[in-house]
Image (cartoon, grey):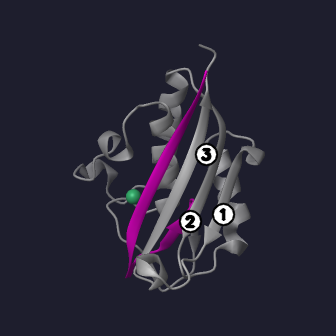
Amino acid sequence: MMRVGHGFDAHRLVEGRPFVVGGVTIPFERGPLGHSDGDTLTHAICDALLGAAALGDLGAHFPDTDPQWKGVDSLTLLAAVHEQLVRHGWTIGNIDATVVVQAPKLAPHIATMRDTLAETLTLDIAKISVKAKTSEGMGYTGDGSGIAAYAVALLTSLE
Ligand code: MG
């Protein structure tokens, strides 16, 4: 059996927060505001994985009202999502994701993000794709006020 899932996430970019994306911290003057570390890409991937398995969404599993998840490294959440998938008999086929942000330039960090995410998911790096886009100055991802990410995931199971 094969199942596809889609995930989306967005965070406001503010001063005084580290810029974390795909588990990688990139030097920048602003970072994503959030209850967790605000790792938009990792959150979109979590939602794509949960969506494919019809297991709800990230907010349902790790409520932002729960102090336990305050400032949490989102890779911890991704690993927990992966554990749930395994428990339900799912294997990840592949993940494809796009991050939309005007700055900083993400291209030099894509390889590290793929490496980090693949390691967290114990997945072959060839099965995880990360792409970076700007929105050419348009909207909240273009004027520097926010960052967005989209992801799709394919799950397979023997059932
Ligand atoms: Mg989020």
Q: Amino acid at mark 2?
A: Val
Please tell me which of labels 3 and 1 falls first in the chain.
3
The quarter holding residue 90 reads top right
Which residue is painted at 63% across and 46% down in the image?
Answer: 95
Q: Which dot marks residue 131?
A: 1
Q: Looking at the figure, which quarter contains the N terminus? A: top right
Q: Which dot marks residue 67?
A: none
Q: Quadrant of ligand 1?
A: bottom left
- In the rendered image, residue 22, in percent from the top left (x then y), is placed at 57, 60
- In the rendered image, residue 111, in percent from the top left (x then y), is placed at 73, 62
Task: Mark 1 and mark 2 in contact? Answer it, CB < 8 Å.
Answer: yes
The residue labelled by disc 3 is 120
- Label 1 to label 2: alpha-carbon separation: 6 Å
Which residue is painted at 25% across and 52% down in the image?
Answer: 67
Please tell me which of labels 2 and 3 falls first in the chain.
2
Element carrying mark 1: strand
* Figure check: 52 above or below 38: above
56 is within the stretch colored magenta: no
The residue labelled by disc 2 is 99
The quarter holding residue 158 reads top right
